[in-house]
Image: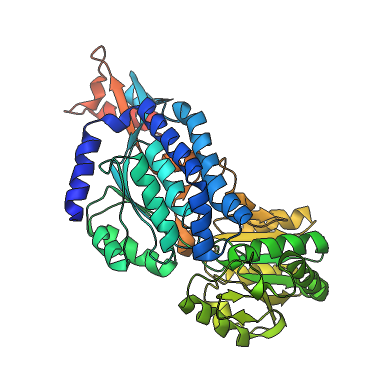
Amino acid sequence: MEYKEMLMRQKQFFNSGITRSVKWRKSKLKVLYKAIKNYQTELLAALKNDLNKSPVEAFSTEIGIILEEISFALKHLSKWVKTEKVPSALLVFPSRSKVYHEPYGTVLILSPWNYPVQLALMPLVGAIAAGNCAVIKPSEDSPASSKIVAEIIKSCFEPEFVDVVLGDKTVSESLLKEKFDYIFFTGSPAIGKIVMKAAAENLIPVTLELGGKSPCIVDETADIQVSAKRIAWGKFINAGQTCVAPDYLLVQKSIKEKLLSAIEKEICAFYTDTPENNPEYPRIINKRHFLRLCKYFKDGKVICGARANSQTLQIAPTLLDDVNLEASVMKEEIFGPVLPVVTFDKFHDAIQFVNDRPRPLALYFFSSDKNRQHEIIEKLSFGGGCINDTILHLVTPYMPFGGIGNSGMGSYHGKNSFETFSHRKSILHKSFFADLWFRYPPYSGSVLKLLMKIMK
């Protein structure tokens, strides 16, 4: 199929004005909601096939979170789309100023394999809510899930409104050559640069949801047992294949041994003594990533784990102590169930350690010290995070989720998804009733003095 033709049909559909109706947008969101509910069994099976996700993990992190996002959009959309009245400056008196929310038009959504359902459909909710048409390109590395996503979309929407294109990276490359009105990409910083470069050729605005090395800092005032449980959960959910998973543990030296021992116990409690043989424990997406992750075992002293099942592509949750800061495990985004451990003596050393590195997508700080909590927020720059927990900041639709710098640009979830896929169009309304004489030439000397008084 010619992508130019596909895009042309979508642009024609968008230009018909159908998608601008709020009632119509809500009806389409309801159709999507119903389809996801109807396809739950198939989605759970596909996620089991691609990543060996248990039904509970698959529903909570993929299906349920999308259903909540749709419900939230349906509840608030009528309020989001309202024209905003803003004050007018004295210089443009008399006038009325308003901001209108306008859809971009046709958007391209490039989604990854690690949460193949959530990260394909979550941005789509925002795109539809804002009144856009969309093309989704799911990952070829999660074929079962991508196939079901395509089936869901085809059962819900006419292709000139929302379409799905399956295929390998050459398909993504071809799509990036087309003149979409907006591009939404979730993936690695390396591919994010390629997407941004392609978008720049046509001056297409982008949202980049990337990743990086997200630190988890634990100081001496933290509750060891609670911290260990929450760190183990956040790191090893989806076998660590989560963009906001703790990428390394930065722990105060005085509590390191107790914390590592507690995390090791939680790993066993969660996944048994042999996670690499546990049918409920997720697997690594493919052989290439499996082999890449296994190489990290040599980058530090193994505290636990470092066992792998090459038949099922499962890797036991692994803790590495005494890591070399120049080793690969501390230079690359891990994206798997390996957690390197770095220690610090004084609190300001931890601050310096994070500040010396690229700004991460997420940061987690475990501490009972309110002053230190404030200092982490004030002195460190990162996309978002939690105090005394992991991952959960992205669950709420009331907060934006996104990165900064190397970890991405733009944000979404809830109202932020609507705003991401909307252009804020400013309109100044003037009447013919009055006209300020000093705006027009020729200008007398008194005009400059008047302007200097007004514009200050």
Which quadrant would residue 138 be assigned to in this image?
Answer: bottom left
| Residue drawn at (37%, 49%) of the image | 151
Query: From the viewer's perspective, is residue 161 above or below residue 263?
Result: above
Identify the residue shown where x is 35% and y is 28%: 24
Observer-nearest residue: 5 or 351? Answer: 5
Q: Which residue is drawn at 61% across and 50% down?
A: 393
Please state the horizontal and vertical placement of residue 224, each as a whole percent of the image: 81, 64
Extreme-bottom residue of the structure:
298
Q: Is 254 on the left-hand or right-hand side of 373?
A: right
**Compared with residue 55, is residue 311 higher up or lower down, i.e. above or below?**
below
Q: Quadrant of the C terminus?
A: top left
Report whether residue 448 is seen: no
Find residue 262 and report its horizontal and vertical position in percent.
Answer: 80, 69
Q: Nearer the viewer, residue 361 or 390?
A: 390
x and y percentages locating residue 320 in the rendered image: 68, 80
Compared to residue 435, the image places residue 139 above or below, namely below
User: Which residue occupies the foreground of this view, 256 or 169?
Assistant: 169
Image position of 390 (left or right of 27): right
Give the image's coloring scheme: rainbow
Name the quadrant of the N terminus: bottom left
* Residue 224 in view (yes/no): yes
Q: Which residue ends up furthest to the top in the rendered image?
A: 433
Image-quadrant location for residue 363: bottom right
Can you say whether 420 is above or below 406 in the image?
above
| Residue drawn at 20 percent across, 29 percent down | 443
Report the number of discs.
0
Instruction: Give residue 364's position: percent from left, percent from top.
Output: 66, 60
Q: Closest to the observer: 73 or 329? A: 73
